[in-house]
Amino acid sequence: MTRLLDVENLTLQFDTDEGRITAVDNVSFSLEAGEVMGLVGESGSGKSVTAKSVMKLNPSNAIYGEQTKITLHLDSGPVDIMSLKTSNDLQVVRGGAISMIFQEPMASFAPAISIGNQMVEQLQIHSDMNIKQATELSIEMLDRVGISDAGTRFKQYAFELSGGMRQRAMIAMALSTKPKLLIADEPTTALDVTIQAQVIDLMKDLVTDFGMGIIFITHDLGVIAQTADKVAVMYLGRLVEQGSVRDVIRQPAHPYTKGLIAALPQLDDLDTPLTPIPGDIPSPLERPPGCVFNTRCSAIVGDVCTSAIPKFLNVTDEHQVACHLYDEGASK
C-alpha cells in the first residue's frame, strides 16, 4: 500500500474562559491509501477534534503543539497541512483531497440554499465540471446512498428532509468529489440498520474503486469490526491502544478497550447484564497525572500508574498498547 496520511505528535489545546485545556495529547498514527481506520472512544475522548485537525477545522482558540506535524501524501507530492494558512491554500484539504461527513447534518447544510446547489457549487470549486456534469453526478450520488426520487430531493432544502435523509445527503456530498481521504464522524448514527449497511457498502466500494482512505469515528464497535482494517482507541485525548481490527477486537490489551467491549450487549445471551466502565470520563480541566485512565481502571499496578505516562509497547507486530501492565511484565 501507499502511505496517505501521517499524523505525528498531535497536541491540541484550547484557550477557554476557564483556562487552557488539553483536548489532544501527543497523538500519532498513519493511514495507507485504501485503508479504513476506526477511531473509537467515549464522548469527550478527543476523536472529532483529532479528525478536524487533519483539515485544520478547529476554532480560532485552538493552539497546536510545536511538535505537531500532519502530512498528506498526494500524487503531486507531500502536503504539510500545518503550514497551510490561507483559505486558498486550505482548499486542498477542505473538500478537495479530504472530505468530512459531520456528526450533525442540519448544522452542515446552508438552510437557504437547496441541497443540489450546495453539491454543485462544491464540485465546481474542486473540479473542472460544468453545471450539467456536476448536477448529473450529484443526483447519481444521492441515488447511490439510498435517497429515493433523487432528482426531486436534489431541488429541496435541508429542512424539507428527514434527519436520516439529511445524513445520507451529506454523505453523498462528501463522496461526490471522490476524495483521497474521507473523515466520517459518526456517519451512520441517525440511520436505520438497512441504510447503515447500504452506506457502509458504498464506502467500501469507493475504497476499492478509488483507493480512498477513511478515518471512521464511531461508538459502534460492531460497525468497526465489519468496516475497518485497523482501530485506534482514544481516551481523554490520548491513544491508549491501536492495531489491526482482528487483534484489538479479539484480544484487547488495554483495560479501557476491554471495558468498551465488555459493555456491549451479548446477542447470544440476552440475560447477561451489561457491564459498564465504572465512573465518568474526567473533565479536560482536571486531567489526572500519569495514565489518564487511572481514575477508572481496575488493573492499577502501583504508583507508576498515577505518576508516569505509559509508552506504547508492542503486543504483536501489528498491535500496540500504552499501559503500565506491560511495562511491569504482567500477563496479558
Image: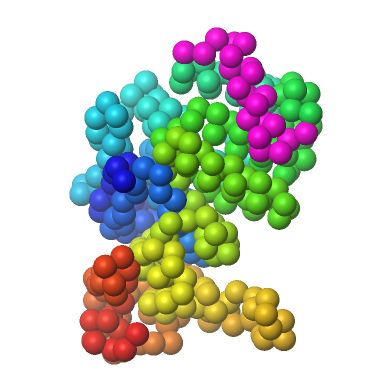
Q: Is residue 174 above or below residue 32?
A: above
Residue 286 in view: no
Q: Position of residue 168 (x, y in %)?
A: 66, 39
Q: Which residues are magenta?
A: 128-148
Q: Is residue 247 above or below residue 77?
A: below
Q: Is residue 134 magenta?
A: yes
Residue 227 x %, y %: 52, 55
Instruction: Please say whether residue 149 is visible from this viewpoint.
Output: yes
Q: Is residue 264 left or right of residue 192?
A: left
Q: How has the structure been colored for display?
A: rainbow
Name the residue at 44% across, 51% down.
36
Quarter of image, res 149? top right
Residue 189 on the magenta segment: no
Q: Picture coordinates of residue 134 (x, y %)?
A: 58, 17
Nearer to us in this view, 198 or 108 = 198
* For residue 158, side relative to residue 62 (left or right): right
Which percent across, then down, holds residue 315? 29, 75
